[in-house]
Image (cartoon, grey):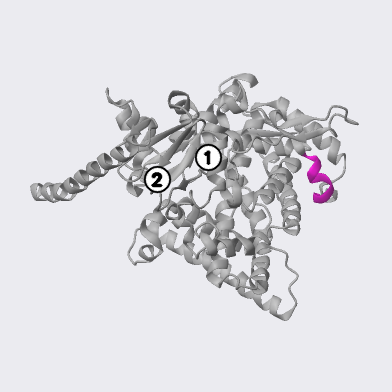
Amino acid sequence: MLSQALVALTALVAPWTLWSWYSLYQNYRIARKIGVPLRIIPISHENPLWMAVDKRIFIPLFERLPFGSGTFTRFNWRGWEFADKYKSHLEMGDVFMVVTPGRNWLYVCDPQALEVIFQRRGDFPRPLEIFEMVNIFGANLSTTDGQDWQKHRKVTAGAFNEQNNEAAWHEGVQQARDMVTYWASKKTIRSTADDTRTFSLNVLSSAGFGKSYPFQGHEEQSTTERAANYKDSLQTILDNCILLFILGTGLISTKCMPRKISNLHRAVVNFKTYMTEVYEAEKAAISKGTSTSKNLMSALIRASQDHRDGGLSESEIYGNMFLFNFAGHDTTSHTLAFAIVLLATQPTVQTWIHEELCHVLGERSADEWSYTNDFPGLKRCLAVMLETLRLYTPVPIAKSTGKNDAHLRVRRETYVIPRNTLVIPHHVAVHTHPKYWGGDSLEWRPSRWITRDEHPASPLDGEKVVTPRKGSFLAWTEGLRVCPGKKFSQVEFVAAIAAVFRDWYVEPVRLGGESMEDARRRVAKLVEEDTGQVLLLQMLHPEKAPLVWKRR
């Protein structure tokens, strides 16, 4: 019986292995004609089964073997770019290619070339198949191209307006005040990342759907409440996006599936139901002329009804609302979690932003803070976000050559990039390369983003946020496909930093008799070594960095 099973397994694996090696050889032949340095790996980054086990199982196993170090263990797992930083480009230059059995991946680390890639959308289109997982509820801004994308862009652009930014400011301030009150009520906090997720979700719920919920700390949350149902549904989808991408919405609905998959299906259904309820209520209110909502959902409905060439369908509105939640939830929450833990390691930076908060906000209560008047003045708080995103950009970026070859000039060389090549704007490398960020490029130093007028009325009034060289900072990508929620995310983040750090400061918990300096060094090291790619870049075990909050 066992021998028969081995024969059957071999019959399945052998053809796949032969086909993979043949494809790898063919891709190598194509790649070597380009004239860039090559690195060859035997398994594609896009293989969904490999994505599920690469770093957790196989890469650690290979690293223990005498011959295990090398190209395979260096480049053949999701998130290798963060660990590698700009090292590969120091070795191989501004452009190199990773050859796989699936597609060839061209990595580019040159701001001028990257600017061209983002400008020439026809030559370097978005590889929509990579983002298919975001198509769960309908086509959206991330999964369309050409005329369809232009329609989505026109309709969604109006949703992210100053009214919505003001809503993000007020909700962000309120949620962050409640969050820091919860943190200060505990001796230690291990749930920073969980709580910033709740914060971000509550802000999105208010700005997106017009539904406000009180902040609940991680230890206080109840799964029986409607807010928790919404939160848990979205969180389950986000945590299992790779599984959802592999199986699809149809297969996960099959009866007798394992509990994890059944829970995922239930989450998809619950989230769709939630969006439908809000959509129908808002559409009815708009038709009666009784709607006073100023949220993303109502803005999408109005824009679709007013669009001359036909607006978005119901499923497309759902698709974009999910995209806004998908793209805006964990990106902001992870960035805020990184920033708070990093601030705990650098009290001088906390003092630096507190000086600005006192200057701009004074002794006014948070209820008196103004988005219009106060947000523009909080440049140091914004610098904390920009510097955190520079080193810990949560979302990778990908382009392709599509169905045609494309010419790309990098420095003095012009390369012909074959069709069906993934072109990767290597944001981790360009964000950390000393050529663009100086000798301390790997240090978290928010002050690098602030410059000063020569003769300001006062030092703080004369400060400005640095505009980086085009192509050297890609946190929200560039070109026409720049993230429409860029300003929204900045407002949300700055509101949180202002509300949390105006009256409070944070320190790491000292462990085992260590000094405070030792604790800060330990946590700073943990942030770097414990960060990895799950769906997005995040701290893998943030609970290992417990924090304590104290009033100023």
* Residue 353 locus on image (x, y percent): 76, 33
| Disc 1 to disc 2: CB gap under 8 Å | no
Mark 1 and mark 2: Cα distance apart in space = 28 Å
Q: Main secondary structure of the magenta part?
A: helix
Q: Nearer the viewer, residue 191 or 101?
A: 101
Q: Nearer the viewer, residue 178 or 39?
A: 39
Q: Which mark is residue 538?
A: 1
* Residue 129 locus on image (x, y percent): 42, 55
Circle 2 — which element? loop
- Dividing the picture into quarters, in which one does residue 155 lie? bottom right
Check disc 1: other Cα within 10 Å, few if <14, some if 14-19, many if 20+. many
Q: Which residues are magenta?
A: 371-378
Q: Nearer the viewer, residue 461 or 512?
A: 461
- Dividing the picture into quarters, in which one does residue 341 lie? top right
Which one is earlier in the sequence, the residue at label 1 or at label 2?
2
Which residue shows up at 30% across the image and 38% down it?
28
Tag 2 residue: 421
Q: Nearer the viewer, residue 300 or 260?
A: 300
- Is residue 238 toward the left or the right of residue 75 in the image? right
Q: Amino acid at mark 1?
A: Gln
Q: Which mark is residue 410?
A: none
Q: Amino acid at mark 2?
A: Thr
- Dividing the picture into quarters, in which one does residue 222 lie? bottom right
